Structure formats: structure tokens, C-alpha cells
Image (tube, rainbow, N blue to C red):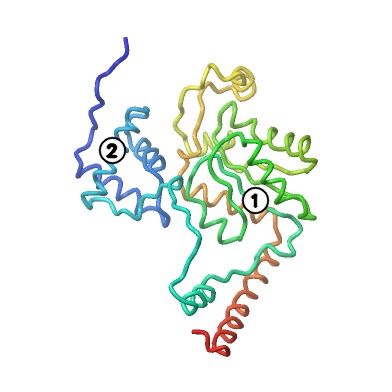
Amino acid sequence: MKNTTRYKFPYSDIELAEKINSILEEYDVPLTLRQVYYRLVALGLMNAQKVYQNLSGKLSRLREQGLVLWERIIDLKRQPEKEPSWTSPESFFETVSQSYKRDLQQEQAKYIEVWCEKAVAIRQITDKYDVSLLAGGGYRSSSALYEASKRFKNIGKPIVILYLGDFDPSGLDIERDIETRMRGVFDIEVDVQRVLLVLQDITDYQLLPSPVKPTDPRTAAYIAKYGVTDVYELDALPPNVIAEKLEEAICRNMDVELYETQLARQELDNAEIDKFIEKGNIS
């Protein structure tokens, strides 16, 4: 018989808000609901789907009541899309002057992209190094790989995909799947490097487990190879660790000195744009 007992949260709303705000203060970036959940689980909250669902509703109410700041929680799957528009030519050129960014990866020996199974806050790292980020989803659809093949086709240099995902039977097969399908279907060679999660992360950061899915056809091989009967989610890793590991992986695959040269050139470019705008009396 299905257990329909409602889970009783162990904290009052005020206590929960204090714990969540304390967690958020540890990081310079906003966190997703799931990242907050795993930080609370590390503090003793029960690790169960019903608890996660309960937290979702509670956190919404805490934000509505002003007990948790809106901007400190982010939903990376619910961002609106709209073609950019401006109120006047002057406002357009002001935007241009502020939004210009030099291609900081030009002249690098490799082309790098970051693919992430989960919607976690790593955009600040990919933006910093000017590399593309493809977030959300495990196995990529044929359409997603086709779009990737169009980006890669005329790159003219080795292609590296830095992959971040869960440690589970299917998640650990994704690198092989991407490489095999890109080669077999689109005749493109890619080097998929798993950044996270790896087996060492489980012990290094004492990640909390979830039961493995017995219906996954890869489960038996997974247990035999890794000696574990649980799975681990990327979201369970502290956000600062995710960012640090990704930054290290990006730097391993590029010439950092060349990157810094392009960064310095960007400052000169910005000054040149300002002069151009002033000369044309645009703003």
C-alpha cells in the first residue's frame, strides 16, 4: 500500500530561511533549488523526493514573504527568450559599447565547449573564458548533435567537449555515446573529457547517494566496474567546487598566456569603440 503520510518539515519557516540564507552567503553566485536542497541534506535534512518537493513549495513562499532574496535563487530552465530591441539608435550604440567582447579563444590550438547534464550555475566560468555552454539533459538528441556538428564542421582544429554530469550507469556512458555518434553519423572527431562527477569526487566530498535504478540496462556493468550500488548527482557537489573543477579543466586545454594576451587586447578594443562612437557623435 502506498504511503501517503505527508512529510513534516523539521524546521519552522524562520529557521529554514536562516539556514538557506546562511548557505547562499557562502557563494558568490545564485544557486538552483536542487543545489540548495543538497546543501540542506548535508546539514541533516532527509534525502528523499517528497522532501525535495516540499522544499520547493516552502522556498517559493519564503521568497514571496521576503525572507529569501529573489535574486539569490535561479531557475536556469525558465529564462525568457526575445529578440533584442532598443528605444532609439542612441540607446543601441550605448548597448554596443557596453556589450562588446573580444573572441578570447581566437588563436588557441583547440576549440572548447562545455556540456553539462544539469542546470547548475557555471555560466560565470564559461563567460570568463569565452567558451560555449550547452546545459541540460543527459543523452543528446539527434537534433542537438546535428546542431553541434554544424558548429564543429569548419572549426579546423581539435574539438574538446568538457562534460559535467551525474555518476550513474547511463551518465557514465554519455562520453562514449557522443564520440561514437559524432564520428559515425557526422564524420567529426571530438574529444569528450569528463570533468565531473568522477569516482574520486564521491569520497573526496562525501557525496550523498541515491539508489541505482535496477531497470537501467547498464546497472550490472556499473556495479561490477565501480563497486558501488548507488548513484550520485552533480547537484550534490558544492557549487564552488563545480566552478573550480571546470575552470581547471578549461585552463588545461588552452594556452593561458595567449588567453591573457587576448584579454588585454579587449581593453584596447573597448577604447577604440569609445573613440569611434565619440567621433561619429553617435551617443
Residue 2 has which mark? none
Residue 237 coordinates in the image, percent (x, y): 47, 41
Dot 1 alpha-carbon crowd within 10 angstroms: few under 14, some 14 to 19, many 20 or more:
many
- Point out the tag, 1 or 2, that comes first from the N-terminus: 2
Secondary structure, mark 2, is helix
In this picture, residue 88 sits left or right of residue 169: left
Task: Quarter of the image for the N terminus: give it.
Answer: top left
In-front residue for pair 180/37: 180
Dot 2 alpha-carbon crowd within 10 angstroms: few under 14, some 14 to 19, many 20 or more:
few
Quadrant for residue 6, please give it.
Answer: top left
Mark 1: amino acid = Glu
Mark 1 and mark 2: Cα distance apart in space? 35 Å
Secondary structure, mark 1, is strand
Q: Is residue 23 above or below residue 224?
A: below
Residue tagged by mark 2?
57
Residue at x-position 76% and y-position 36%: 185
Residue 174 coordinates in the image, percent (x, y): 64, 34
Mark 2: amino acid = Gly
In-front residue for pair 257/179: 179
Residue at x-position 53% and y-position 21%: 229
Residue at x-position 24% and y-position 49%: 64
Asked whether disc 1 touches disc 2, contact meaning CB atoms under 8 Å apart, the reply is no
Residue at x-position 65% and y-position 51%: 113
In-front residue for pair 274/225: 274
Residue tagged by mark 1?
113
Quadrant for residue 199, please give it.
Answer: top right
User: Seen from this angle, which residue lies furthest top?
Assistant: 1
Residue 220 coordinates in the image, percent (x, y): 61, 17
Residue 56 coordinates in the image, percent (x, y): 32, 38
Q: Is residue 102 above or below residue 174?
A: below
In this picture, residue 233 sits left or right of residue 172: left
Q: Is residue 159 above or below residue 44?
A: below
